[in-house]
Amino acid sequence: MTRLFLVLALLLVTAPVARAAPAGAPTVEAVEPSGMSLKLEPEEVRIGEPFTYTVTLTHPRDHRYELVAPQGDSPFEVLGQMRERQDGSASATTTFSLKMSAFELGSQKLPDLSFEVATPEGPRTFAAPGKMIQVTATLPPDANQQGSNLFDFKPPTEVPIRSWTLLFVLAGLVAAGLLGWALVRWWRNRPKRVTQAPPQPLDVRVRRSLDLLRGEGLPERGQVKEFYFRLSEILRGYLGERYGFEALECTSSELMASLRRKSTPGLPEDALMRFISESDLVKYARAEATPDTCRGALAFGYELLDKTYVPPPPPSQTADAAGPRVQ
């Protein structure tokens, strides 16, 4: 009986120590569409040949699905993307068509696709599982008998060559370094005459950058990727300076999350999400874009500036608001 009392006393002493585990960091809730279909055309392809992966989602009409560009290493390459939406009386159907190619043989699993979903209750996420696809070789079945078998890469072989080129290059680099050091020292010690011009307004600087980008004609010269890198940097820099946060170092999801936490009257959120998705596909997934598409993206940059920029009040109004000065 004494031992039983001791056990009960020990339990009463240690019971208050147990506490609930602290809640984890808040995460974006997931949402499920009312219907989903995955389609491959064709379901068996040769290595390197393009195929079409179609994802059709049926969802409430007030929901909007945006595809997040696939990230990470994968035996698949995204060549292009198309998005189509059809609205009904109570629901809507959104279809994503991805043009892809595979570079590993055998039965391969397509990457899971992630979606950002805009709902009346706030942002949500959805992930669609990838389908299996059969990737075959381009050689015929009797290639081994005909002597057309593929061979693996051979490791590099060192070939000794006597040359003084490396010494000359090193000597040139040392001389260039000394000359650069001397120029930097002279530049720092030179007499300086500082003349600082007043900074131009934000909208003037951003509009001038957009005009310069348009005048370079990068899409017409085939430099579509460089065009989207430049345009994305201009718009991210504008949004960061306009709303007061570091936008250039944010990922696409972090950028949208930062904007949603701030007061952004007039911000075309849906159009901005489409531009970010399109820009990421061109910059990182090597998707194709026509000059007309690039001109539409540049026009969106002007539209974003016109809808969100609010000029500061004139200096006279600022002085009046501060009140009269005592002489």
Image (tube, helix red, strand yellow):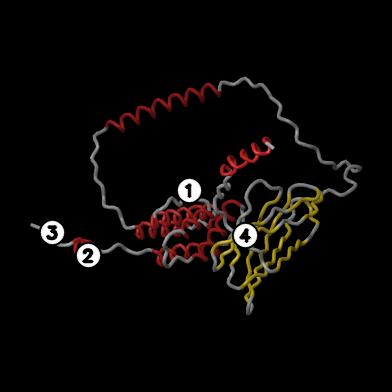
Q: Position of residue 279 (x, y in %)?
A: 55, 57
Q: CA separation, marks 4 and 3?
A: 58 Å
> Which residue is located at x 30 percent, y 32 percent?
188
| Of the pair 154 and 11, the residue shown nearer to us | 11
Horizontal relation, residue 251 to residue 98: left or right:
left
Q: Which residue is mark 1?
A: 249
- What residue is pinned by disc 3? 325
- Crowd tier of the residue under label 2, counting other residues whose Cα lies within 10 Å: few below 14, some 14–19, many 20 or above: few
Q: Which badge, 2 or 3, comes first in the chain's sequence?
A: 2
Residue designated by label 2? 317
Residue at the limit of the structure toward the front, as seen here = 1
Secondary structure found at label 3: loop
**How far apart are the two marked residues, 2 and 3, measured between alpha carbons?**
14 Å
Q: Position of residue 121 (x, y in %)?
A: 54, 66
Crowding at mark 1 (Cα within 10 Å: few <14, some 14-19, many 20+): few
Left or right of 87? Residue 75 is: right
- Front one among 16 and 86: 16
Residue type beneath disc 3: Arg
Name the quadrant containing residue 66: bottom right
| Label annotation for residue 30 | 4
Proximity of marks 1 and 3: CB atoms separated by less than 8 Å: no
N-term-proximal mark, 2 vs 1: 1
